[in-house]
Image: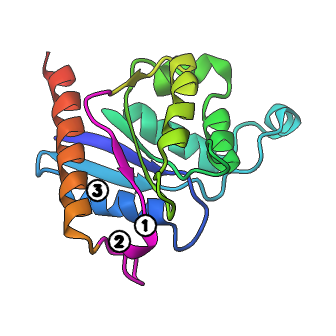
Amino acid sequence: MTRLIGLSGSLRQASFNTALLKAAAQVAPESCHIEVHTIHGIPLYDADLEEHEGIPPAVAQLKDAIAAADGLLLATPEYNNSVPGVFKNAIDWLSRPAGDIARVFGAKPVAIMGTSPGNFGTLLSQNAWLPVLRTLGTAPWFGGRLIVPHAASLFDANGELIDAAARTRLQTFVAGFCRHVAGLHSA
């Protein structure tokens, strides 16, 4: 069984990206399990806080989950044509202390997807993540890209993905990433 951690980069209760991640977990192949996480409970990064109190429990738990997973699926919003500050903050915490970067992120297969209400989905945000992922030593998957524009018309009031074409694209994307990760672990 391929085990992925899906991480939503939004704090919003009715986040389209969290909904997209939950839909990804629903459409994943039977051989692949996606465990959905959010960045709730992660404080703003503060080196003084880290020095005096250590790594916050929410960060430590998420670090351990990512380290134990076969791959990481990021569902990123796009704010002002780039990565959301709260999501970048969470990744910054996850890279602390620096000695843990290899354990948490080293050669970890990572796929990026995202949805937004606008016309361009999260194209710019996804591109902006690439230097961060390279710096952390991850292994980004370039076998597919999932950019889902017009989110408000694709999800119902309960956060269910109701658009059949978007669901099919999501299913293809997730299946491709799962095959990629499984192939790495069987080699």
Query: Helix, strand or loop at disc 1?
Result: helix
Q: Which numbered disc, 3 or 1, marks the residue closer to the eye?
A: 1
Local crowd size for mark 3, using a 10 Å CA cut-off: few (<14), some (14–19), many (≥20) = many
Q: Rounded to the nearest whole Å, what is the CA distance between mark 3 and mark 1? A: 15 Å
Local crowd size for mark 2, using a 10 Å CA cut-off: few (<14), some (14–19), many (≥20) = many
**Amino acid type of the residue tagged 3 in the rendering:** Ala
* Bounds of the magenta segment: 142-161
Local crowd size for mark 1, using a 10 Å CA cut-off: few (<14), some (14–19), many (≥20) = many
Q: Rounded to the nearest whole Å, what is the CA distance between mark 2 and mark 3? A: 14 Å
Identify the mark nearer the N-term, 2 or 3: 3
Q: In the image, what residue occupies the spot 19% across and 68% down?
A: 164
* Residue with the mark numbered 2: 154
Residue 8's x, y, as percent?
49, 53
Residue 68's x, y, as percent?
38, 34
Check the image and report above or below for 3 versus 86. Answer: above
Q: Which mark is residue 151?
A: 1
Q: Which mark is residue 24?
A: 3
